[in-house]
Amino acid sequence: MAYGISTYAYFWRISERAPRPLTLPEMLADTKALGGEVFQICDYPLIEGYDAARLADLRATAADLGLRLELGTRGVRTAHLLRYLEIAEALGVTLVRSMLNTADHRPSTDEAVDLLAPAVQRYAASGVTLGLETYEQVSTDDLLTVVRRVDRPQLGVVLDPGNSVARLERPADVVAATAPYVVNIHVKDFSFTRRDGWIGFTYAGCPLGEGLLDYDGMIAAVRPHERGLSQIVEHWLPWQDEGFEATARREDQWTRHSITTLLRSAS
């Protein structure tokens, strides 16, 4: 079991709003400095353009820092997943996260099973696990139907219970249903706040431990320590009205707070 950080914890600092977006080596160095053991390169399409030499350099950088790498993408088209398997092999990655839908493809459960089965067979042969994330576009029942029908230990669930609230699924129910199939955990806290005039709510991230995430209950159900599963810090940090510098500082504070909280929980 290991604690780590995702590119999503650097969301604004690698965005187009950043005067100079952070590079992957800079994020790796920061993860190491904060005490992380794993770095998850998640929904970072630039990685698809890396040639063999650049991937080798990135793998060497992570190794020099003593970090393990994980990878993340979206979609279940077989060819796309096999491309990410190639990247995973080049980086020494043994866990790839994906999601069922993309902007231009929303497969049925039957289609998803048909697309995933040959890809997962290849993943298994390479010693790589594929995890499908819980989120609002796909019901947890449908996600689990796909995982159960493919029926291979190399296909599981990336648990992020906060994502499913927008589908009116209770986080505790998502945790309970997916717990036996979880292969990776995204750790981010979340809360509702009233809009001005008490007209509706804003659902957004908050510092770990200050929101609705029942972290202890999730860990008790999933047992990542016993099962050797990584826990990866992410955020839903809203853009700060004061601009980029204020947003970047707050993002760094949240990342530091989250990874420190996780490390303390393990001691």
Image (spheres, rainbow, N blue to C red):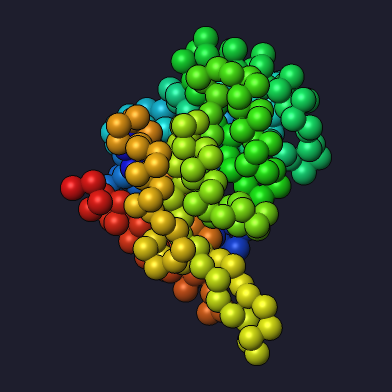
* Residue closer to the observer: 8 or 138: 138
- Residue at horizontal 69%, vertical 43%? 138
Identity of the residue furthest to the left in this view: 267
Q: Position of residue 195 (x, y in %)?
A: 63, 81
Classify 55 as above or below 242. above
Q: Is residue 155 visible?
A: yes
In the image: residue 92, left or right of residue 202: left
* Residue closer to the observer: 137 or 26: 137
* Residue closer to the observer: 134 or 105: 134
Q: Position of residue 248 (x, y in %)?
A: 46, 66
Q: Position of residue 216 (x, y in %)?
A: 34, 52
Q: Position of residue 168 (x, y in %)?
A: 65, 57
- Residue at horizontal 54%, vertical 34%? 157
The quarter of the displayed image where residue 4 is located: top left
In the image: residue 8, left or right of residue 121: left
Classify 107 as above or below 35. above
- Residue at horizontal 65%, vertical 38%? 141
* Residue closer to the observer: 71 or 75: 75
Which corner quadrant holds the N terminus? top left
- Residue at horizontal 49%, vertical 43%? 176
Q: Is residue 5 visible?
A: no
